Image (spheres, rainbow, N blue to C red):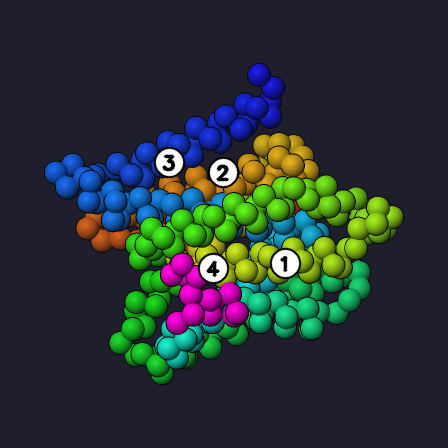
Amino acid sequence: MTEIKRTYLIAILILIAAILLSLFLRLDFSNAALLLKELRFPRMIAAVAVGGALAISGAVMQTVLGNPLADPYTLGIASGAALGAAMASTLGFHLSFFGLNVGAVLGAILVLIALLKLVVKGARKSESMILLGVMISLTCASLLAIWMALADPMGVQSITFWLLGDLSRVELKSGLALLGLTLVIATYFWFFSRKLDSFLLGENTVESFGVSLEQTQKASILLVSILVGFCVSAVGMIGFVGLIIPHLVRQRLRSSFHYHLIPLAFITGAAVLVLSDALARSVSEPHELPVGAITALVGAPLFIYLFMKRKRGDLA
């Protein structure tokens, strides 16, 4: 068995184990059928979809921006989606896609438009986008806090829990729709993996291959924004998955080429979020922890490790 096949096998087995753990950990077998159908299966599907979506989103953004610290959260796209979802909900704007709030997607796209308008073109464009994204993210978070306090003072605690990641509210149809959308966009990126690979060779090489750097970059970020918008509308904000998972997969593959990076990032991201959700649900029963707190608790030390490794020149 080749190394790449072994990597796929390990990733798939971990995902299967995570799914079984999520479904059956501390399950009350006297009422198992109802619990599985109404609660555990929908949130497991949502965890697979969102974990995979965030991981491939991070992988694509790190490539097209040429920055290993890029992901939907550092660019402010997730915060824009959260603000859009909250405003749409409180204003009675109920346009939805299989139960997923379209307001979140509009918020994510508006942040993307603002980024593209404000960013300064030049050699440090990716760094400018990251810095602007962080500022936009903080602005959106502040506006969201003010909006919720004014619109629904009694609902601030509920929205805070949602913002930290909450898979308990996802219905089956929403989870399946999100999984379908994630698979479609992941397949698109996988199909055009050579276009993404060309970014690894530098701007001049990309242009010589007939690939428009700017158009491919904008199209990729737009698709990521749509995907992340729907993810945020379903489960709130879950950080670090999109930032950390692509780096872990690249280190395992010892390669940044996207033909294997995209599917393995999806599988690994799905497994990590399914495990995180199972831990968040069971570690302090009968209380439930926000799943975003679990991913942040694990992801923050890994982020520091990757940052220090990049500083030493070991991480491209």
* Image position of 275 (left or right of 186): left
Q: Closer to the camera: disc 4 or disc 3?
A: 4
Q: Is residue 101 magenta?
A: yes
Name the kind of residue labelled 2 in the image: Ile
Near mark 3 (Cα within 10 A), the count class, few <14, some 14-19 or many ≥20, is many
Report x, y in % for residue 127. 69, 61
Nearest the camera: 190 or 95? 95
Name the kind of residue labelled 3 in the image: Ala
**294 shown above or below 74:** above
Query: Which picture quadrant has residue 121?
Result: bottom right
**Among the two numbered marks 4 and 1 on one chain, the one whose residue lies closer to the N terminus:** 1
Q: Which residue is mark 3?
A: 18
**104 shown above or below 186:** below
Name the kind of residue labelled 1 in the image: Ile
Q: Which residue is mark 2?
A: 267
Q: Is residue 265 magenta?
A: no
Q: Secondary structure at mark 3?
A: helix
Q: Which residues are magenta?
A: 94-107
